[in-house]
């Protein structure tokens, strides 16, 4: 099969999934008809499970997904209307008028239940509100994105070592150390702050927001990317000393349980986060007007590591985690890694021009199409083991909604179309 035929086949499948399965599913699922906002706990058939807890992460990610689909011109104004009611619920119930910042969780009716201030949620508030502002022209949303940035720079920034603390009580006092996160910083949060600040700059054109995004990029490479391997280090002390990555008590509600109270080994990295960081970095480089040549080799290391160690070349898909210098150690396959690696490998094709990345894309694409997507319903299953046995079957949870899936389908469709246009008949 020629390269053009391979791209045409992949593009046809992605478009079918996006326009005939994924977007139709989310046009009729997720909205809370009683209180507004979004119901994110959905069973294998996409029906609400009865759990109505609302997390700021899922509410903002849903807003982003609906707004971005409209802004990308793959969905009509119904999606913008859905995003709008999500913004109304978010502003009405999640903002803390007393201490500022966003509550971590609310009950279905909007009553705050966990008033903690967690940076992960704040990064997605900036990301979602700036995306919605660009899609709708809503100045209030943009003002709240900027207010969020002001809040975290005032209350969460670490003036001694740079970057941001991540886990705070309702009044912005740091949480306890260890599993409560009060003494930790992470690659994950700072990567998402990079995308949030980039989006805010795109929405405003303000030089100060460009500077914030550039500062986070510099920080990521100075402290959070391994100096030898070029891969991501997950967690740190405040002075940037790498720490064994642990699961936090009040955050990772749908994360896999690795059964290791001491945390992951220090020699460990996430294939999904590495590739997600690489393609988000390329997006930031484009929006911020940076020189791509300064970052191509750094991107290559992130992509090459995943291709060498993260892809299951026999069974298909990408594994969760492993060492910097050897095969995957944790071989479960989560939905979000598949989504991010699909986008990233297409980006690698465009940026680096190596057809081996198209082989990697096709591997993960095939796994997703044949195993991960619940074609009868329209969304993706969350988790498989290394033998591709489905472990969980729900469509939505506190940590799984349409953010990774819709974004990946839109981004893959755009990249496949661009690659196809560059490929001779």
Image: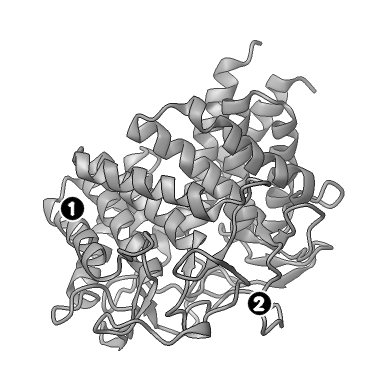
Q: Which residue is the extreme one toward the top?
A: 424
Residue at the spot of label 2: 263
Q: Position of residue 261 (x, y in %)?
A: 67, 85
The residue shown at (47%, 51%) is 220
Q: Is residue 209 left or right of residue 335?
A: left
Q: Is residue 377 left or right of residue 157?
A: right
The residue shown at (58%, 26%) is 350
Looking at the image, which is closer to me, 98 or 301?
Answer: 301
Looking at the image, which is closer to me, 101 or 402?
Answer: 101
Q: Are marks 2 and 1 in contact (CB under 8 Å)?
A: no
Screen quadrant of the N terminus: top right
Could one spot residue 279 in this view of the protein?
yes
Q: Position of residue 117 (x, y in %)?
A: 32, 77
Q: Quadrant of residue 421?
A: top right
Q: How many marks?
A: 2
Q: CA gap, disc 2 to disc 1?
A: 38 Å
Crowding around mark 2 (Cα neighbors within 10 Å: few <14, some 14 to 19, many 20+) is few
Q: Is residue 280 left or right of residue 327?
A: left
Q: Which residue is the extreme one toward the right?
A: 314
Residue at the spot of label 1: 142
Could one spot residue 249 in this view of the protein?
no
**Which of marks 1 and 2 precedes in the sequence?**
1
Q: Circle 1 sits in a helix, a strand or a loop, which is it?
A: helix
Looking at the image, which is closer to me, 402 or 127?
Answer: 127
Looking at the image, which is closer to me, 398 or 25?
Answer: 398
The residue shown at (64%, 11%) is 424
Crowding around mark 1 (Cα neighbors within 10 Å: few <14, some 14 to 19, many 20+) is many
Q: Position of residue 327 (x, y in %)?
A: 82, 55
């Amino acid at each position: 099969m020629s390269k053009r035929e391979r791209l045409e086949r992949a593009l046809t499948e992605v478009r079918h999934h996006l326009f005939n399965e994924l977007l139709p599913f989310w046009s009729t699922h997720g909205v809370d008809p009683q209180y507004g906002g979004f119901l994110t706990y959905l069973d294998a058939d996409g029906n609400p499970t009865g759990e109505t807890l609302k997390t700021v992460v899922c509410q903002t990610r849903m807003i982003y997904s609906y707004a971005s689909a409209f802004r990308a011109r793959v969905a009509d104004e119904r999606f913008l209307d859905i995003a709008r009611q999500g913004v109304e619920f978010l502003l009405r119930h999640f903002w803390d008028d007393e201490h500022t910042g966003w509550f971590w969780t609310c009950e279905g009716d909007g009553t705050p239940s966990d008033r903690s201030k967690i940076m992960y949620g704040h990064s997605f508030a900036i990301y979602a509100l700036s995306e919605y502002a660009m899609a709708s022209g809503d100045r209030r949303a943009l003002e709240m994105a900027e207010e969020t940035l002001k809040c975290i720079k005032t209350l969460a920034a670490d003036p001694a070592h740079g970057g941001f603390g991540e886990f705070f009580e309702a009044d912005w006092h740091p949480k306890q150390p260890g599993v409560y996160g009060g003494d930790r910083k992470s690659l994950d949060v700072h990567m998402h702050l990079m995308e949030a600040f980039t989006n805010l700059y795109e929405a405003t054109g303000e030089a100060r927001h460009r500077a914030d995004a550039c500062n986070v990029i510099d920080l990521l490479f100075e402290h959070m990317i391994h100096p030898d391997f070029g891969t991501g280090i997950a967690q740190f002390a405040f002075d940037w000393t790498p720490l064994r990555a642990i699961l936090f008590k009040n955050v990772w509600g749908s994360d896999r349980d690795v059964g290791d109270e001491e945390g992951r080994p220090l020699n460990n990295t996430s294939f999904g986060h590495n590739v997600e960081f690489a393609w988000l970095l390329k997006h930031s480089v484009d929006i911020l007007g940076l020189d791509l040549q300064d970052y191509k080799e750094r991107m290559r290391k992130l992509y090459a590591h995943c291709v060498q160690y993260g892809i299951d070349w026999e069974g298909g898909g990408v594994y969760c985690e492993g060492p910097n210098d050897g095969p995957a150690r944790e071989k479960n396959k989560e939905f979000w890694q598949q989504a991010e690696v699909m986008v990233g490998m297409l980006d690698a094709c465009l940026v680096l021009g190596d057809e081996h990345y198209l082989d990697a894309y096709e591997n993960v694409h095939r796994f997703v199409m044949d195993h991960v997507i619940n074609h009868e319903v329209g969304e993706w299953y969350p988790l498989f083991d290394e033998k591709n046995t489905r472990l969980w079957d729900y469509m939505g949870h506190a940590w799984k909604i349409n953010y990774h899936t819709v974004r990946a389908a839109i981004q893959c469709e755009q990249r496949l179309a661009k690659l196809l246009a560059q490929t001779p008949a």
